[in-house]
Amino acid sequence: MGIPVSYNLRNLVVRKTTTVMTALGIGLTVAVLLAILALVGGLRSSLQSSGNPLQVLVLRKGGTAELSSVVTQANFQDIKFKTGIARTNAGQPMASLEMVTVIDLESVDAPQGINVTLRGITPLGIEMRDNLKIISGRWFQAGQREVVVGESIGKRFPGARIGQRLHFGRGDWDVVGIMSAGTGASNSEIFGDLNQVSSDFQRPEALSSVLLRTTDAVAAKALVNDISNDPKLNLDAMSEADYYNAQTSSGIVIESLGIFVSIIMGIGSSFAAMNTMYAAVARRAQEIGTLRVLGFSRGSILFSFFVESILLAALGGLVGCLLVVPLNGVTTGIGNFVTFSEIDFNFRVTPQIMALGVAFAMVLGALGGLFPARSASRKEILVALRGI
Amino acid sequence: MTDNVVIQTSSLTKEFLRDEFHVVALKGVDIEIHKGEFVALMGPSGSGKSTLLHLIAAMDVATGGNIRVLGQDLRALNDRQIARWRNENIGFVFQSFNLIPVLTALENVELPLKLTNLKKQERLDHANTALKLVGLGDRTGHFPRQLSGGQEQRVAIARAIVTDPALILADEPTGNLDAGSAQDILSLLSQLNKEHGKTIVMVTHDPHAARFASKVRYLEKGELLAEGAVPAD
């Protein structure tokens, strides 16, 4: 058994000012990392929860986004009766032809305006989105210039609330409802009647995508192959889940940048921990000498100061977690590089992310504590006893 | 060497460089200390008495000669072995007590036992017994700052004896104490020597403290004077 951990903990308490200052420094670094991870986690959660593995999305050949895809009414007729497509209770194929474009809206963060996804959709398309529901107002009526906005749009775009009018296409559109898709991407979209939207944008034939519900996973895979390999169609099909997963590229850039910044800050924080621990070693030189005289080995001394540095940093990690917890659930939005529109989502501060933050802090403590601990263990007994 | 010899040195020398000056701290010291003796090492500052004590405790390494303590050739041990040997065989009492300030009296005394195989309760029992022996059974939960100098030194002595070492080394143990506390500490050391058979080597400047020892040896300019001899001045 080595030097008791209580020795290290009590020394951290005794040096409370330096302990708190160092922990705060490390805590801020951890908070930056956690905020980035919570943001990316929220984005991923939003996109991943949007994809139903039983649903297949059809775009033009080579298309990666609905916005840049063109699917015609004729294409729709060719594919809606393919094998493996599920049927409604009324016996209709569960196939939804949709049109996607972007409109410019003023947001709380961007008064100059920002792109928002507008989706022309039929009642069947709404029905195929399992988590989608009206939380305020009502659905739009066919043939009317009415829209329903996603929950996040309602929060972040002051001009897009129930009772207000949006101007796009050929006229003004009434906001008649707010919909929620749980954590899904539809929260960041505006839905209107397909015929009305495509007419206003003069695209009655050039629509964007088809969403198909299949009977099972095997049928989904077969349908993807069938459509993609049909040379007459000139279309690509993919699982809806894969489509949304591919859009997390926006998050990867932010995540990489955030991790890079956190590492730079982390290096600074580990120097702070190192400075604190060097000061501790200098101040406790006589104790180190005494411990050696009592029979504790150089290894025990090294381990003890190393552990103390890690404990100090873990405290910083907890501070970082506390700093970032208020972010949990806060709605934000970023530009989606695939759809060229804003996607809104909530920060997700999960226990896993916090554990990662504490682990990151402990790594900083280990890096910062290694050299001071080694310095402590290398002190000659008589030199240490003289307090040098 | 007989079993009765606890410390034996021959031609023990310690030299070092200080600010480019060659210093001879110990010059060919030959000494034998036997089991159960209470030896006071005296001499003026710089005479080498503390250096000799540090070599006996394996806290420093001789530059020449031989030293055996409790039958062990200290120069044959590596760093880790010395640490373990010191823990098992030596109790050290410092002039400035050197208690760990963030640990209670009981925890300070328990500290050397952390290196043994004793269970937690056994360690606490031993530490409590040692504290009772030095008269501080009612101060176990006190931190060093809550104790007087004399009490701190008693805790340090309890810590030195808790592993039941064969040899106790004391470096000016009364140097930081008032006369009354010093008397108590010396009486305690004498009691450990007489009643518990501990061999004690004590460095001191104080002739009064030396009177508690069974034998006094003088050092002068790094040389050990012959037994019974005293420095000229």
Image (cartoon, rainbow, N blue to C red):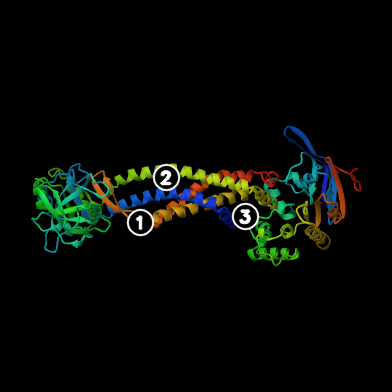
Residue beneath disc 2: A262
Residue B232: which quarter of the image? top right
Closest to the observer, B180 or B20? B180
Secondary structure under badge 1? loop
Secondary structure under badge 3? loop
Identity, as a three-letter code, of the amino acid under mark 1: Asn
Do dots 3 and 2 share one subunit? Answer: yes
Number of numbered discs visible in the structure rendering: 3
Q: Is there a contact, CB below 8 Å, between mark 3 and mark 1?
A: no
- Position of A181 with respect to B20 (left or right) is left
Residue A129: which quarter of the image? bottom left
What is the chain identity of the residue bearing mark 1? A
Image quarter in which the C terminus of chain B is found = top right
Q: CA distance from mark 3 to mark 2?
A: 33 Å
- First in sequence: mark 3 vs mark 1: 3
Q: CA distance from mark 3 to mark 1?
A: 40 Å
- Position of B39 with respect to A133 (left or right) is right
Q: Is residue A227 above or below residue B116?
A: above
Residue beneath disc 1: A328
Residue beneath disc 3: A3
Q: How dense is the environment of label 1, judged by Cα within 10 Å: few (below 14), some, or many (20 and up)?
A: some
Residue shown at the point (75%, 52%) measured from the top left: B95
Do dots 1 and 2 share one subunit? Answer: yes
Closest to the observer, A242 or A84? A242
Front label number (3 vs 2) = 2
Identity, as a three-letter code, of the amino acid under mark 2: Ser
Q: CA distance from mark 1 to mark 2?
A: 19 Å
Residue B185: which quarter of the image? bottom right
What is the chain identity of the residue bearing mark 3? A
